[in-house]
């Protein structure tokens, strides 16, 4: 009964929203010898409410931009490489980076340019250290938080999903002409960045020293529900 319910929920919605129930059923199934991974079953969803999206759309309108939003699933970069390899070019070999994922599903929004449909990074966020860029994200986020949304420096697996989803839905690449910094550790003191040089290039996942800036590495604010911890 429990296994059938979980399977039907996964087929219907792609998730099991009742985490407590999934934990109970998962314990029973594991006791029977079933291979059950709770992060795959107990996916907590965080949608953007319509009024929250409206706030962001109004902000975008004032800046002459548009908003796109996509569902982000608990899929690591490694899993995405298996499912959508043609979309990728170079991907950093760090196992920590490739396997990083959080067991939550959420809606994420990004501001894009109307004409090109390309994501718009924060001005003056290039050639800065990771710490300086994180402070810029926090400053950008503050006016949004009283409306129940916030801006984050997203993990690499989030940025890659957003770019691929944008291509599948619109035919346009999202991250073009820059590399969005992430907080994800790769090797030594470096952290990952995601993007491409031009629209003819596949999606790359590089890295750069967290204490150093680079002319193509910038901040791309990703807007999510304020109660999401990721």
Image (cartoon, helix red, strand yellow):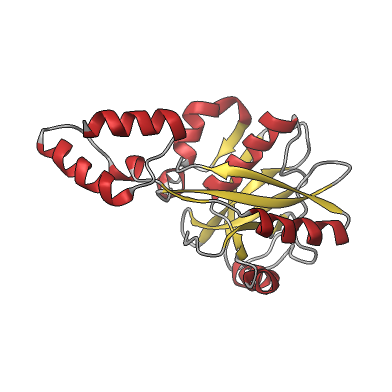
**Closer to the camera, 74 or 136?**
74
Residue 81: percent from the left, percent from the top?
50, 32
Residue 148: percent from the left, percent from the top?
60, 66
In the picture, residue 98 is in which quadrant? top left
Residue 53: percent from the left, percent from the top?
69, 55
Q: Residue at x 50, y 27 (%)?
A: 83
Q: Quadrant of the N terminus?
A: top left
**Closer to the camera, 107 or 130?**
107
**Closer to the camera, 122 or 169?**
169
Say above or below: 167 vs 181: above
Q: Residue at x 84, y 53 (%)?
A: 65
In the picture, residue 166 is in which quadrant? top right
Q: Count of labels shown? A: 0
In the picture, residue 22 is in which quadrant? top left
Say above or below: 217 vs 133: above
Residue 213 left/right relative to 47 = right
Residue 165 left/right relative to 4 = right
Q: Is residue 220 visible?
A: no
Q: Is residue 217 visible?
A: yes
Residue 123: percent from the left, percent from the top?
80, 64
Say above or below: 37 vs 102: above
Q: Residue at x 24, y 37 (%)?
A: 36
């Amino acid at each position: 009964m429990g296994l059938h319910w979980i399977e039907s929920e996964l087929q219907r919605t792609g998730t099991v929203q009742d985490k407590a129930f999934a934990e109970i059923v998962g314990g029973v199934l594991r006791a029977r010898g079933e291979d059950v991974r709770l992060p795959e079953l107990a996916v907590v969803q965080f949608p953007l409410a319509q009024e929250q999206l409206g706030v962001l759309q109004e902000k975008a309108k004032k800046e002459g931009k548009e908003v796109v939003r996509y569902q982000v699933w608990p899929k690591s970069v490694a899993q995405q490489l298996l499912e959508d390899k043609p979309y990728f070019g170079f991907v950093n070999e760090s196992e920590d980076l490739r396997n990083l994922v959080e067991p939550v599903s959420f809606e994420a929004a990004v501001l894009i340019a109307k004409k090109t449909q390309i994501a718009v990074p924060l001005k003056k966020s290039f050639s800065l250290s990771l710490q300086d860029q994180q402070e810029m994200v926090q400053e950008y986020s503050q006016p949004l938080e009283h409306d129940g949304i916030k801006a984050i420096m997203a993990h690499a697996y989030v940025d890659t999903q957003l770019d691929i989803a944008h291509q599948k839905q619109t035919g346009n690449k999202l991250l073009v002409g820059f590399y969005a910094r992430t907080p994800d550790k790769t090797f030594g003191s470096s952290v990952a960045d995601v993007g491409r040089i031009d629209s003819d290039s596949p999606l790359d996942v590089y890295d750069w020293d967290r204490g150093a800036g680079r002319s193509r590495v910038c901040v791309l604010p990703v807007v999510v529900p304020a109660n999401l911890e990721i």
